[in-house]
Image (cartoon, helix red, strand yellow):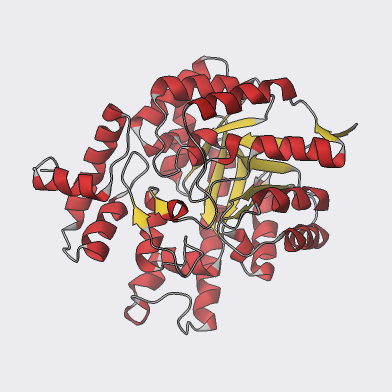
Amino acid sequence: METLLIKIYDQTLRDGEQQAGIFFSYKIEQELAHLIAKTGINGVCMMPCVCEEEADMAKTLLSEDLENLLIADTLMNKQSIDFAKDCGIRRIVLFNALSDRLLFLRDSHIRSLEEFKGKTIDDPIPSYIINRIRQNAIDLIVENLRYATTVAGLKVDFAAEDASRADFDFLLQSIRSFSPYIENFILCYTVGILTPEKSYIWVNDLLQSTKGVSFGLHYHNDMGMALENTLQSLMAGATLVSGTFTGIGERAGNVSIEQVLNGLRVRFGIEVNGINYDAIATVTNYIEQLGIRPAAPYSQAAQRHESGIHVNSLFSDPYSYAVFPHAIIEVIFGKWSGASNFQYLFEKQLQKPLPRSQYEKMRSVIKSLANEQERYFTANEVLELWQSGVFE
């Protein structure tokens, strides 16, 4: 059997737990991390900056001999970079959007201009504005990559959020700009338009157009093609897979690590170097015993959102994280939520706007409650808490 030298980054404890409705207790998260480590994967990803409990968990795992595996998914700012380093983490994945749709939403200077307020990329946006937001993004990312590597002294990978919807030439420009600072450029199929055939061509074209770049894959399963898209991208030359065990994750989930590993083994006669295949079932059985499954592609359950980063974009552009025109977006509340979750509820759904400071206060309270009660909260439950004065 052929051996393939690719890396596997596990996202079960971060992107997996961000699946709407999932909450891993401290004990479960700790046990899962150690079970996952036994499979021989190359990295266990967390997001310690999301709340105090996640930071404590990261420090615990580092003290339990997982320092060579633990990776921090990190926001694109120096404060988050320093926070990861202060936790004791040695490798981070800095992430930032590269599609025009998401870049337009997140460029605070452009969005503050009167002529672009309330607009999305589907409106007539001048080309010079598109070029400006692209350059602003490259400048911001390079600044933080340089800081993370040269000042903080961390090992760094970059995750290109929504890369499959990015302009190809701009994607190439980004790869060339970032490659001096990173070990892996992770292509994210966040919602996007990939099919198996397009996946192979896309990755092959990127490899043909660049030099000395290692490409990773982080593919979601909105259309039920994450596995085949990943396999075809690996056949084209990608060398890293970022996914979750059992395929749990936001919306319809991530590519399933065990399916990728066994798919390569059974279909292509390829084993991934360093993987303990006998340990995989222990992880998947553990998750299944918790009663956790990914939401089915195309289902209403896959339209639920808890991540504050995602809800903030959905507030301004429903196509930012929802690929289907018929989708009915449902926002829930938990430790991954931001102030935008409450803004979405009160302004989009109830048309009862509150001061921004109130949304921030609600976010802090709900994160504490979610961790204390080890659960998430529905919109109706949040309204009951609000009416009873819990957020005061």
Q: Nearer the viewer, residue 70 or 89?
A: 70
The residue shown at (39%, 38%) is 50
Q: Within the image, what quadrant is residue 52 found in?
A: top left
Query: Going by the image, does 308 lie left or right of 66?
Result: left
Percent position (x, y) of residue 142? 57, 54
Percent position (x, y) of residue 93? 57, 42
Q: Which of 134 and 293 is in front in this view?
A: 293
Q: In which quarter of the image is the N terminus?
A: top right
The residue shown at (40%, 72%) is 110
Percent position (x, y) of residue 376? 32, 39
Q: Quadrant of the C terminus?
A: top left
The residue shown at (43%, 34%) is 48
Residue 270 in view of the camera: yes
Query: Is residue 85 placed above or below 136 in the rendered structure?
Result: above
Percent position (x, y) of residue 162? 57, 59
Q: Which residue lies furthest to the top in this view?
A: 64
Q: How many marks?
A: 0
The residue shown at (53%, 81%) is 128
Query: Is residue 127 placed above or below 65 in the rendered structure?
Result: below
Q: Within the image, what quadrant is residue 207 found in?
A: bottom right
Query: Is residue 61 placed above or below 3 in the rendered structure?
Result: above
Query: Going by the image, does 17 lie left or right of 349?
Result: right
